[in-house]
Image (cartoon, rainbow, N blue to C red):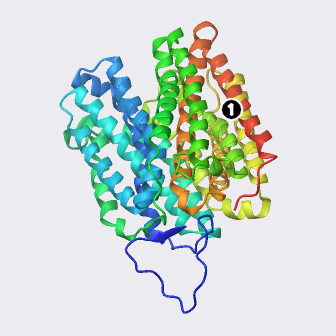
Amino acid sequence: MTKREGLPPLQRPHATPEPSAGTKPAAAGLSGLALVVVLTGYALSIVDASIVNVALTPISDDLHGGAAALELVVSGYGLTYALGLVLGGRLGDAFGRRRLYAYGLAAFTVTSALCGLAPTIEFLVAARLLQGAGAAMLVPQVLATIQAATEGQARARAIGMYGATAALGMVTGQILGGLLVSLDVAGMGWRSVFAINVPIGVAALLAVRRVPATRADAKPGFDPVGTVLFGLTVVCVLAVVVAGPDLGWPLWLWALLVVAAVGAVALVRAERGLEARGGSPLLSPTVLSHQGMRRGLAAMVPFSAGFGAFLFVYALVAQGHFGFDGLASGAVLTPFAAAFFAVTLFTPKIAAALGGRIVTLGALVQGAGVLLLALVIRLGWPHPSLALVLVGIGLFGVGAALTGPTLFRMILADVPPAQAGMGSGVLVTSQQMATALGATVGGTLYVSVSGWLSTVSAAVLVLALLGCFTVTVLVISLKLPDPR
C-alpha cells in the first residue's frame, strides 16, 4: 500500500478492515504538471549518459586527460548509476518517493554544476561518479510514483510517456551535445553540456511539491548482506562489459564473471532466507517470481541489448564511414525519435485492442526495419539510399514504441505499490545493464569484423545480431500476459 505523506488518516464512519500490503490502493492522482516534473529529472539522467560523448575531444584538450580518464568520464557515470538504482528504489519505498526524488535531483543538479566547473580531469571523474549516484537516487522514484499514483489508462499513458522519454533522451543527448559544443555558448565550450542541467534541474525542484508524496506504509528494513552481494554482482558484470573492449578481454577479466555468478547465487539464497524469516530483502523473491515480472524482464533484456547495439554501432558507421559529426549523425535519428513519440501516444489503445500481442507486433515491425537497413546497406554500399535508411530507422522506432512501454507495464503490473520502488529499480537496472551489454557486444563485433573483412560486412553482421535479439523478443512475446 501507499499513503500520502503529511496527511492525517481518513476518518471512516464504520470500522473496516485495513487492506493487506498487496492490495491495490486507490490512485493518489498524478497531474500533468507532476508527470512533467518527474519525467524532467528522468530525461536529464538519460541525456547525460550520452551528451558527454561528443565533448570528449575538447575535454581532453582542455583538461589534458588520457584515454583511461576519458573512459571513466563516460563509464563512471553509468557505473554508479546502475549500482545504486535498486537501493535508491528501496530508499524511496522507505522514506518517501517524492522526498528521494527531490534529494536525487538536487544532488544531480549540484554535481552537474561541479562537472561544468571542473578544473582537472580527476575532479571531473569524481563529479561524474557523484552525478551517477544522484541519478540513481531519483530515477527509481519516477516509475514508482507512476505505479503508486495512477491506475488503468492513466497509468498506461504515463508509462508510455516514460518510455518515450527514455528513447528520446538517448537520441537527444547526442544531438544536444553536438549543438552545444558547436555553438560554444558564452565561450563555455564543453562545459555547457553539463551547465545546461542546472537551470532545468532548479526549475523542476521548484515544482516538485506538485508531485504526490507516496511511500510504503511499513518501512522496509535494511538488508546489508543483500546490498553487498548485489553490488558485487553488478560491479563485476559492468567491469567486464565496460573494460573488456579497451583491455582486449584478458583472462582475469573473464574471471570476474565467475565471481558475479557466485555472488548472484549467494544473493538468491540470502534473499530467500531473509524473506522466509519475515525480513525485508533488497530484492524480494516473491515479487520477482510474478509471471509479468519474470517474463517481462526476459523480453526486456534482449530488447534493450538490441537498442544499445543499434545506437552504438550506428554512431560508429555514421561518424566513421560517412563522416557525419555528432550533430549530423544525431539528426539522422530524427525519424526514430518522431516515430517513437507519435506511436507512444496510441500505444495504450493498441494494447487494449491486442493485449500481449502488441509486443509481438512491435518485434515484427522492428525486425522489418532491421531487415530493410541490412538490405539497403548491403546492396547500396558505399552510398546507400538515405531515404530508405531513414525509413528503416523509422520502422525501428515504431517497433520500439510498441514494445518498450508495454514491457514496462507488464513488469510492474503485479508489483505491490508498497514495493514499487524496488520493482522499478530492478527494471531500470536490467534495462541499463542490457543496453550497455548490447553496445559492447555490437561494438566489439563491428570493430573485429571490419578489421579483417569490410565495413559493410561488419555493419550487416551487427544488424543480423539485432535481428537475433528481435527474434528472441518475438518468441518470448508469444507467452507474455496481457498488459494491465
Label 1 crowding class (10 Å Cα cut-off): few <14, some 14-19, many 20+? many
Q: Where is the C terminus found, in terms of image quarters?
A: bottom right
Asked whether 292 or 200 is in front, the reply is 292
Asked whether 48 or 143 is in front, the reply is 143
Residue 72 in the image: above or below residue 429: above
Image position of 41 (left or right of 322): left
Q: Quadrant of residue 406?
A: bottom right
Q: Quadrant of residue 148?
A: bottom right
Asked whether 135 or 405 is in front, the reply is 135
Q: Is residue 85 visible?
A: yes
Find residue 79 and report its horizontal and vertical position in percent: 43, 33
Q: Name the residue furthest right.
A: 478
Find residue 125 and report its horizontal and vertical position in percent: 29, 30
Disc 1 marks which residue?
373
Image position of 324 (left or right of 309): left
Q: Amino acid at mark 1?
A: Leu
Image position of 45 (left or right of 118): right
Q: Name the residue furthest bottom.
A: 13
Q: Is residue 39 visible?
A: no
Q: Secondary structure at mark 1?
A: helix
